[in-house]
Structures are given as C-alpha cells and as structure tokens.
C-alpha cells in the first residue's frame, strides 16, 4: 500500500479491516494543519467491468448523501472527499476522537439507566434527522456510536459548536450495500449482501428489507447492551413470542424505561415505535420531573396526588392492552375464603350464618377511584401541596349512609367483595409489584383517558414502579352505595423512593363489573 493515497492522504495506521475493505487513520498533507481524517477503502466484491461501472455510479450518489447528512448534524461525521484509485473506492471522513460504546463498557463497566437515557435522548434526534432524508442506517450497534472527546481547548463555547461527550453515529451501511452489487448471468444487477450485524439486526433486515423501524430495533438492543454488558446472542428468548429475555440482567431498571426498550425491540416492526421521534417523546415524557397531577414542592420530586387533584391519580395502559377489566387476582381466593366461611357457618349453626351475612351486608359497594399521577405528562401549571390529615374537611353528614344494606342491591353481599376490601386489595396488589394485575382494576374508560394518562400503561408503571416505594392504607370508609356503584374514601400515605412521605385523601368511584363479578375503579377525586 502506498504511503500516500490520492497523492494527498498520508496513512498513519490501519484502524480496521473486513470483508468490504480497510479503514485507515491518515493526515491530509494538503491542509496546513495536516488535519487527521478517516479513510475507508471499499472493494467491489465482483471483478467485472459492468459491475465496476454500476458501483462507480452508485458510489457517487451515496457519497453525495453522506455529505448532505454530515453537513446537517454535528453528530454525524463530515465527508471531506471521495475518490477512486487502483480500482478501489475511498471515502475521506471526519476523524471522531473518543471511545465507542463498546470500549466504554469494556473499560468502565455497565452504564446506569440515567446514562443510557441521556445517550438515547441525544442520538434519537440524529436518527430522526437521518430518517427524514429517507436513509436507513442499517448498522446501529455499540461499535458504531462514538462518545466524542472534548476538543483540546475545552473551554466552552467549543469551536464550531462541537461539544464533548455527545454520541456520534458512524459507519452508515448504504455505501457498503452499493459495493456489494452483483450482476446476474442474465445481465441484471442486484445487491446481494445484507448489511447489518447479527444479533443487532431485526428479522426484516436479515432478509434484505430494512426500514426505519429496523434502526429503532438496533438502537434498543444497543441500549440493553449498555445496561447489561451482554450481546443479544448471550441472552435467551421467550420460545412462545421470540421476545428477548433481558430484564433479569438489569434488575435496577425502572419499569417505564424497560417498557420503552421492550417496545423498541419488538419482533414485528409494526409493534415498535412508529418513528425515532415517537421513541424520543416517550423517553422524555417518562423522564418528567414529576407527574402533572402530583403535588409539587421544591426540589422537584414525584409525590402523591393531592385529594384536590383527583384527575391526576390514575395512569393508563397501552391502547390495545387489558381492555376488559378483570377484577383483582385475589378475587378467587376471596371467594374461597367466603364460601369456606359459609360452609363453616352452616356446620356451626344457622345463627352464625345469619350473623355472617348481616355483618357483610353492612359493607355496601361504593365507587372510589384512585388517582394515579402520570409520570409521562407535563407538570401541572397549578400544583398543589398535599393536605395533611388534620386539614382534610370532614365528610358532610348527608354524604354518609346507614349501616343498613341498600334494599335495591340485587347481589347478595355474602358473595360480593365489599368496596372497602376492594380498595385495600388494590393497594396490596400494587405493593406486591403486580402492576399489570392492578392495572386491570381500572375501568377501560379510565385507562383510556388520554388527557389524564397520555402514555397509558407506561404512565402507570412509571409512577408505581419507578417513584412510589409503598402505599400505606390508613383508613377506608364507605360513603355511599347503589345497586352497581359505590363511593369510598381512602386515607393514604405515599412512601416515595426519594424518602418523602406524602399523605393523601382520595374518593374513589367504583362500578360493579357484572361480567367479571368484581369492582373496577371508574374515577378518583
């Protein structure tokens, strides 16, 4: 290999080699600063004059695209030049000083969730920009994202607006595909090589049909690598769905962030985020300092919803999930206990049964719906401090009911879970981390309230799984009941993961789900 390429670029060292050619670090001898650059040498895979002519035409077009995207973003290497020499094609690009994400993990260990989020939030606008040009990167992986070092003179503002630490997306695959052009015996040209890296490449790309969602898949797996230190091939998959089983290697990740990554790496492209912008919005909304319905105090923290902000207390699930409210997982156990009590009452005597029935009839169903603040929505413009128990207004006498059962209740109380018990079971399910089951306690209309819960189930698990350590239920009182409705007041204490303890009083509106024989939460105030 000559010391000079194109009679201009002096090669310093070889950076890498592969099936497409080699990559060199070089100096531009025709620049006063002898600016360093990266030169990629690309070799056509078929020695055929017809192929060479086709590749030459396409190579020029792809180089022009690389120049355009490089000029439009500081997080894409700039294309300085391209040329042909000795039957081979060369790209001259900006040299990005820094370390790849692979090198960072190998040298410094796993990254925190906040660090990975920061990288994603920085790189997703770049990916959205690339896609807006109609370009699919095709080879996003830890080796192809470099964290740029600060310039030698690192006193801000940096030259040209370039800062240190931001991720830079390198090694676009379109040029490699061009180099892989073949001509069939019939004289037709075809691009025979699939561009991408096994493990980080989704199924549609592996059969030569890359799309924008393919890049989102690869970026999601890159984020999982940063959290776990494991390549996709090192982790198992669910034999029923093909889903990657990665969460066991990143137990400290919040449920909301894990849900974002799970959506990004769905097997079917249509189940992933529709765009890089949509994924970015999901991350940014999930990282909001506090849910809009939660009381706010300095410093900004997630707190429990105030009783004065009822609409902000319940989060919603994904639009196509859990549409039929199936009441609490404890329902079967409660019925078993109840029937056992009845049988025991029969064996002991009719008087015990009567006493049992009367006691249960005093707890008439009532609707109370809990407010679950959305971690994914914007902060409330008029946040309110949670009131202490002493400041809560007592219930007016006309809002209370007699302990006598409502005669119109058509379902025997011995069979029906009381509204108070339902609310206690609801919070017990949350405290046990069974968020999907707790989500099913919400009526579909409350789940799908986009004004209150724009991110659906992600909002729900971000609040309960990411911000609340535990809920203490101090008191649950029945306020009023009807045949299929009930209202319950709950005095709660939110034990936050940041150490705060926030009291709250919530009135829940409950509906009786006849089909599933259980209460569901319809509203909360």
Image: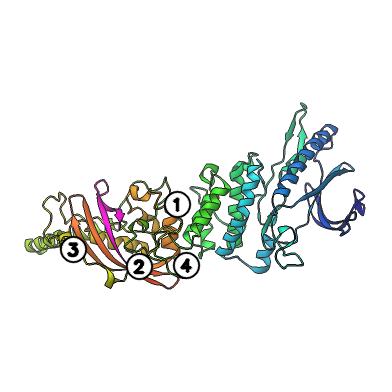
Frontmost residue, 3 versus 187: 3
> In the image, is residue 469 above or below residue 379?
below
Residue interval drawn in magenta:
504-525
For residue 386, the mark is 2
Q: Assign a secondary structure to mark 1.
A: loop
Assess disc 2: are there few (<14), some (14-19) or many (≥20) residues with their C-alpha within 10 Å of its C-alpha.
many
Query: For the residues marked 1 and 2, what is the alpha-carbon distance in whole angstroms?
Result: 24 Å
Residue 305: quarter of image:
bottom left
Query: For the residues marked 4 and 1, what is the alpha-carbon distance in whole angstroms?
Result: 21 Å
Majority secondary structure of magenta residues: strand
Residue 231: quarter of image:
bottom right
Decide which of tag 1 and tag 2 comes sooner along the chain.
2
Which residue in the protein does label 1 denote?
A: 455
Decide which of tag 3 and tag 2 comes sooner along the chain.
2
Assess disc 3: are there few (<14), some (14-19) or many (≥20) residues with their C-alpha within 10 Å of its C-alpha.
few
Q: Nearer the viewer, mark 1 or mark 2?
A: 2
Q: Assign a secondary structure to mark 4.
A: loop
Which residue in the protein does label 4 denote?
A: 300
- Left or right: 215 in relation to 29: left
Frontmost residue, 328 versus 248: 328
Which residue in the protein does label 3 denote?
A: 396
Assess disc 1: are there few (<14), some (14-19) or many (≥20) residues with their C-alpha within 10 Å of its C-alpha.
many
Q: Nearer the viewer, mark 3 or mark 1?
A: 3
Quarter of the figure that contains the C terminus: bottom left
Marks 2 and 3: in contact by CB < 8 Å?
no
Please state the horizontal and vertical placement of residue 181, each as a whole percent of the image. 76, 37
Marks 2 and 1: in contact by CB < 8 Å?
no
The residue that appears at 63% across and 49% down in the rendered structure is 127
- Left or right: 212 in relation to 72: left
Q: Residue furthest front?
A: 382
Frontmost residue, 114 versus 354: 114
């Amino acid at each position: 290999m000559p010391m000079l390429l194109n009679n201009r670029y002096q090669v310093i060292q070889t950076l890498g080699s592969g099936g497409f050619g080699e990559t060199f670090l070089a100096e531009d001898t025709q620049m006063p600063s002898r600016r360093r650059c990266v030169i990629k040498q690309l070799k056509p895979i078929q020695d055929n004059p017809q192929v060479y002519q086709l590749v030459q035409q396409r190579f020029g077009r792809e180089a022009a695209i690389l120049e355009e995207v490089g000029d439009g973003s500081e997080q894409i290497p700039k294309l300085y030049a391209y040329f042909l020499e000795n039957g081979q094609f060369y790209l001259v690009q900006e040299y990005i000083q820094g370390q790849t994400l692979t090198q960072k993990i190998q040298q410094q260990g796993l990254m925190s969730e906040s660090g990975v989020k920061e990288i994603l939030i920085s790189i997703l606008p770049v990916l959205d920009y690339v896609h807006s040009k109609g370009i699919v990167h095709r080879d996003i992986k830890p080796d192809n994202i470099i964290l740029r070092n600060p310039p030698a003179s690192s006193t801000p503002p940096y030259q040209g607006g370039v800062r240190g630490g931001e991720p830079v997306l390198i090694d676009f695959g379109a040029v490699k595909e061009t180099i892989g052009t073949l001509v069939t015996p019939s004289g037709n040209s075809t691009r025979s090589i699939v561009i991408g890296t096994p493990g980080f490449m989704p199924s549609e790309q592996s059969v030569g049909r890359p799309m924008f969602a393919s890049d989102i898949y690869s970026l999601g797996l890159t984020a999982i690598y940063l959290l776990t230190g494991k390549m996709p091939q090192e982790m198992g998959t669910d034999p029923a769905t093909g889903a990657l089983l990665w969460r066991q290697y990143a137990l400290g990740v919040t449920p909301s962030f894990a849900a974002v990554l799970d959506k990004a790496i769905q097997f079917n492209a249509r189940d992933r985020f529709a765009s890089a912008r949509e994924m970015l919005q999901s991350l940014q909304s999930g990282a909001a300092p506090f849910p809009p319905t939660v009381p706010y105090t300095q410093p900004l923290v997630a707190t429990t919803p105030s009783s004065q902000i009822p609409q902000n207390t319940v989060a919603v699930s994904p639009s196509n999930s859990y549409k039929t409210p199936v009441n609490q997982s404890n329902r079967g156990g409660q019925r078993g206990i109840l029937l056992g009590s009845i049988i025991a009452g029969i064996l002991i005597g009719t008087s015990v049964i009567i006493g049992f029935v009367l006691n249960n009839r005093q707890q008439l169903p009532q609707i109370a719906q809990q407010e679950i603040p959305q971690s994914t929505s914007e902060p409330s413009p008029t946040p309110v401090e949670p009131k202490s128990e002493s400041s809560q207004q007592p219930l007016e006498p006309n809002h209370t009911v007699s302990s006598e059962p409502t005669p119109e209740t058509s379902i025997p109380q011995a069979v029906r879970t009381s509204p108070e018990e339902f609310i206690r079971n609801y919070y017990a399910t949350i405290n046990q981390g069974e968020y999907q089951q707790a989500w099913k306690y919400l009526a579909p209309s409350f789940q799908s309230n986009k004004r209150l819960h724009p991110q659906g189930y992600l909002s729900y698990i971000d609040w309960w799984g990411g911000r609340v350590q535990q809920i203490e239920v101090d008191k649950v009182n029945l306020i009023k009941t009807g045949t299929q409705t009930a209202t319950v007041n709950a005095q709660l204490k939110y034990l936050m993961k940041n150490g705060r303890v926030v009291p709250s009083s919530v009135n829940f509106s409950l509906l009786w789900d006849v089909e599933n024989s259980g209460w569901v939460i319809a509203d909360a105030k």
